[in-house]
Image (cartoon, rainbow, N blue to C red):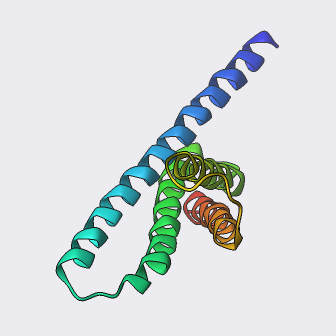
Amino acid sequence: MKEISETRLVSEGNNVIKIFKGIVISCIITFALLFIYAIVLTYTDLPESTISPVIVAITGVSILAGSSMTTSSIKKNGILNGGIIGLIYIMLIYLSSSILGSGFALNLYSIIMMLIGIIAGMIGGIVRSKF
């Protein structure tokens, strides 16, 4: 009985590390894609009105990729683990942008970003854990 509970604790601790890796992967992908977008925005005549939609798309793609890579190694509860990755990622981005930026304002854009983050994480968790 004790061996079963110890194995479960090790497995759950391992999942926490894998979820953290998924968040890190998502952040790396986000920074890389935002860097590329910034270069394109700087050296082309791309209008600044594209910033918000591109940021939403980059965030969604990053979370989708990070959660799908992570949940493939967890092998179960893909929708839950992917949603957790999306939620924690978005909360980290929200907190950092609120501290560095304009303060803790919750507006429609913030809510949309949170929903996209959670949904993208859940989809990434479903897609990869099924294959």
Which quadrant would the N terminus be assigned to in this image?
A: top right
Q: Residue furthest front?
A: 102
Seen at 30% across and 72% down, the residue is 37
Question: Left or right of 65: which side holds 33?
Answer: left
Q: Residue 113 occupies which quadrant of the picture? A: bottom right
Residue at image x 67%, y 30%? 12
Residue 24 is left or right of residue 79, and the answer is: left
Q: Position of residue 42 (x, y in %)?
A: 22, 75
Residue at the left extreme of this rendering? 43
Going 53% across and 52% down the picture, which residue do you hit? 97
Percent x, y of residue 90: 60, 54
- Above or below, 59 relative to 98: below
- Give residue 43's position: percent from left, percent from top: 17, 78
Taking the view exactly as shown, the residue that stands out farthest to the right is 1
**Towards the viewer: 24 or 6:** 24
* Quadrant location, the C terminus: bottom right
- 100 and 55: which is toward the camera: 100
* Camera-side residue of 99 and 80: 99
Q: In the rendered view, would you say 70 is above or below 119?
A: above
Residue at horizontal 27 percent and vertical 77 percent from the top: 41
Q: Is residue 125 left or right of residue 23?
A: right
